Image (cartoon, coloured by chain):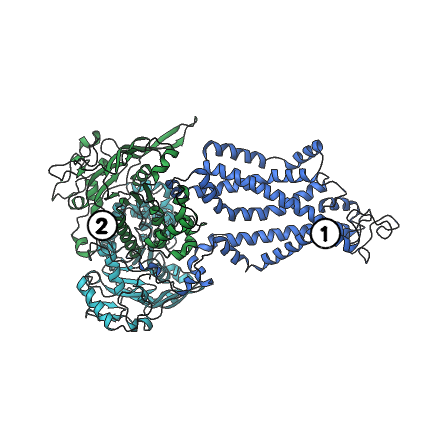
Amino acid sequence: MTTASTEPLITEPLLQVRDVRKYFPVGRGLLGGALAEVKAVDGVSLDVQRGETFGLVGETGCGKSTLARCITGLYPVTSGHVVLDGTELTGLSRRRLRPLRRQMQMIFQDPYGSLNPRRRVGSIIGDPFAVHGVASGAERRRRVQELMSLVGLNPEHYNRFPAEFSGGQRQRIGVARALALHPELIVCDEPVSALDVSIQAQIINLLEDLQDELKLTYIFIAHDLNVVRHVSDRVAVMYLGHIVEVARSEDLYTLPRHPYSAALLSASSVADPDEAEQKQRIILRGDVPSPVNPPSGCPFHPRCPKAQDKCVVEPPPLERKDDDPVDHLAACHFPVQPGEVLSQP
Amino acid sequence: MTLTSVETSVTGTEEQAAIEGRSPLQLAWARLRQDRVAIASAVILVLIVLIALFAPLIASAVGWSPVQQDRTTGISPEGLPVAPGSAHWFGTDNLGRDILVRTVYGARVSLLVGVVATVAASVVGVVVGTLAGYFGGWVDVALARLMDVVLSFPFLLFAIALVSIVGPSLAVSVGVIAFFSWASIGRIVRGQTLSIRQKEYIEAARSLGAGDFRIMVVDVLPNLVAPVIVLASLLMPTAIVFEATLSFLGLGVVPPTPTWGNMLADSLQFYSVAWWFVVFPGVALLITTLTFNLLGDGVRDALDPSAERLFSTRRKRGRR
Amino acid sequence: MSLLEVRDLEVAFHTADGTVRAVDRVSFTIDGGQTLAVVGESGSGKSVTALTLLGLNRGAEVAGTVLFDGVDLLAMDDEAMRAVRGNQIAMVFQDPLSSLHPLYRVGWQIEEAILAHRDVPRQQARARAVELLDLVGIPEPARRVDDYPHQFSGGMRQRAMIAMALALDPRLLIADEPTTALDATVQAQILDLIRRLQGELGTALIIITHDLGIVADLADDVIVMYAGRVVERADRRTLYYHPHHPYTVGLLRSVPGSVARAARLQPIPGQPPSLIRLPSGCRFHPHCEFVMDRCVDHDPPELRVLGGLHHGSACWLPGEMVGTDDDTHRRRSAYAGAHRQTLVGSGSTAVP
């Protein structure tokens, strides 16, 4: 399996993901065995460099959120390796994993569901300190209030409850909680999807400012390609549990090589009438197949306008195409060529 | 600093008034206070509790103890109970005991059994329900089956059998009632825990490295407080009736200690000639259970989150 | 005569906490075959407006006139309204899962929609249902007509909803966030479908959305709503390339990948006001960078800007200051600064 970045690197990547698989059992047989498995993540490898924002895009069920949870250790992986800062995380017990969690935090999608409604904001943001026994009493309160002003919340609201904040402010609370232990890597799982557009921009700017100030590394998951393009240095496109393409964001948006990336990009709407009119939309036929019985060969072949017999049989490796930049990889036997217009099969 | 965005600056005076923030329970309390029926029920219940607490004072003021037999004015020449009058405001029973004092003392037993059994049942129910809901899998299967078994037990037969072995007493009553009540709470707590477990904030706590015990105590339990308060306030009257039933059947508190249940049992032979013998303990039981139920309904309405959703932030601002 | 003419529509809800002024003096018109986009964020009143057109707002206090083909819908009784709803005007909602009844077959639900308004035999209604499912691109419609909603994917459910809405050849289709719950490629399929059907059937379309990308793609005319009011209206190109109202400009500058391309997004500070306690004057003034003295206590009427026929904006800034570029931004700031003596309650200051 090829890794997402083959460029010779001066520094070791902060995060290395190697051939990670996560299968969920579905249904129960008579003897308690699983009847089938959902292959949510099916052999993903990627590297995340220090200080970069690594975007992860894909549609519902592509496995991007599952991958995020495998990386942060919320789900044990079925197979594969997750290496953070040189330390292997997979297979560690919860106790051994706990100190490593300080380096890696998560921001969640739902500003309503991710905060316990029965707890005061100060206690929610102070949770990391309590769990890791870092600071207590007045010291904890002082540090929580520092975090609150860092993310643009009024520190005097320490004793309020989540219900008293708006969606955008709640997302700031989630950001403050993630920052508490000075992590190096923050996995943002659709952090702005549930917010109104004007509030989205506030949170995106906040995340960018914090990255500059605190030298953070982000994995940024979203389904809005415009948002991902705006925030990410590199982007990986996922489809049915696989990474089908990974590249610097400009490269991906200029010349998507995988037909699915191309279709996804063409489907994303832009708030610009001229550009919208020029856009050659690739309308995909049908729906995403079930991850219980993924297609043979290339997972995209049943919907691909360029599919040929080879695609049905042979899974394409994730590799560099033609004279693309070295860090632009696509998993496709018949990559999209510059200027090519994809038509319906 | 630049990161401090404008979002907090536009709040104005109305938000500054509430910097401390009100907890969901405080908001529920504010709603409950507007519920006249619930408040009236609460006042009556407080009175009943006070009466129970000061039962000895009432007894000495009336001049009779609950087991004392008034053989002069307390029993008619025919040997029948005496009707309410100046000597005995609520009349007397067949042994010439003062029904007022006995009813007052009966409140002690009812409330004691009700409170202790409810608290015990709630604690057991919460612990078992939380464990089952949180851990799922085999733990859940085992505990859920256990609750099903308890709930399908014929409790009266069990009580009769138990009492015939160990003999009737207050402790046995409490034990029997608690044993047959915890499972209904446990079942609902399990369901609540199952849904809480799916919440993103549980995932957030896990991603911080919090252990299961901490998550259960810090994140799950506070979310169970509201439903358990409702369940407990509705379980209380059931427990009181349960106790009265046991006493009525002679399986509960041993005579001559007065309870509403055994008073009603004693009155059965006399109800045609001595209405007061039935009415006063009966009404006391009715009022107590009714007010508990009404208060429980009020608490449930006050805590019901679905009624809160629609315009929640605006509502709170409006109240300030 | 316009197909639909809404004049000074007002909708208020009375709640325990006060009166929610959800829609305030909203006017617009739409002609046959046209697409009107109503853009706004949550609480802007865009969905309430749509529901009111169909008489689906129970307990609301409604004022104004809604002329459909010259007949005032708001003056109709329930029965007359029912005859219009579904028949002349149809609606597609955001969530196709909750809009289809889970226990009835998809085809049966479409048949019922037809039979509610047309006196035809069920066989004929069924044939029409199959035809409609085919029209909206459901594969094997003759077989899928007997499926239950859970057997359909999200995109297919939304197609089925559109099929149901089109069952009676309505003259006006109102789509409330029709693709918000869907993935990008499915959204593209649905928008493509809507565009194709509109071309084939000549239906007028009101699309309600928060997504400026969809609007750029689909609309002829656009109205932008904020806190219950229309703050700007224009044809699509004017709205994107020459916006006037600071809220519209703010929206465009805060969306990545819009006409206002910037290395850094320029968010609108704060959040929209409570509809119970609206700010004095212009309701956007507490968050407006260009707040002037008169904005605080004088609510601007909708003024014609740019000399265009249909370009209106409810803002006191001079009509020629249009656009999202930095230069216009500076001119706006300079003008506003010169017309501001006392800064009252501006949201653009940081926490001390």
Q: Position of residue B25 (x, y in %)?
A: 50, 53
Q: Which of the numbered marks, if any, corresponds to residue A17?
A: none
Q: Position of residue C219 (x, y in %)?
A: 24, 58
Q: Residues within 10 Å of mark 1 (few under 14, many from 20)?
A: many
Q: Which of the numbered marks, if any, corresponds to residue B55?
A: 1
Residue bearing mark 2: A230
* Left or right: A172 in relation to B117: left
Identify the element where label 1 is drawn.
helix
Q: Is residue C155 visible?
A: yes
Q: Is residue B165 placed above or below C80 in the rendered structure?
A: above
* Left or right: B213 in relation to C350: right
Position of the N terminus of chain C, as image quadrant, is bottom left
* View extreme (top): residue: A31
- Residue nearest the observer in this picture, A303 or B144: B144
Q: CA distance from mark 2 to mark 1?
A: 75 Å
- What tint does the image give chain A? green
Identify the element where label 2 is drawn.
helix
- What tint does the image give chain C? cyan
Chain identity of mark 2: A
- Residue nearest the observer in this picture, B179 or C93: B179
Q: Position of residue A18 (x, y in %)?
A: 26, 32
- What tint does the image give chain B? blue
* Left or right: B111 in relation to A159: right
Respond whether the residues carrying marks 2 and 1 are from the same subunit: no
Position of the C terminus of chain C, as image quadrant, is bottom left
Q: Is residue C170 visible?
A: no
Q: Position of residue B65 (x, y in %)?
A: 78, 49
Q: Residues within 10 Å of mark 2 (few under 14, many from 20)?
A: some
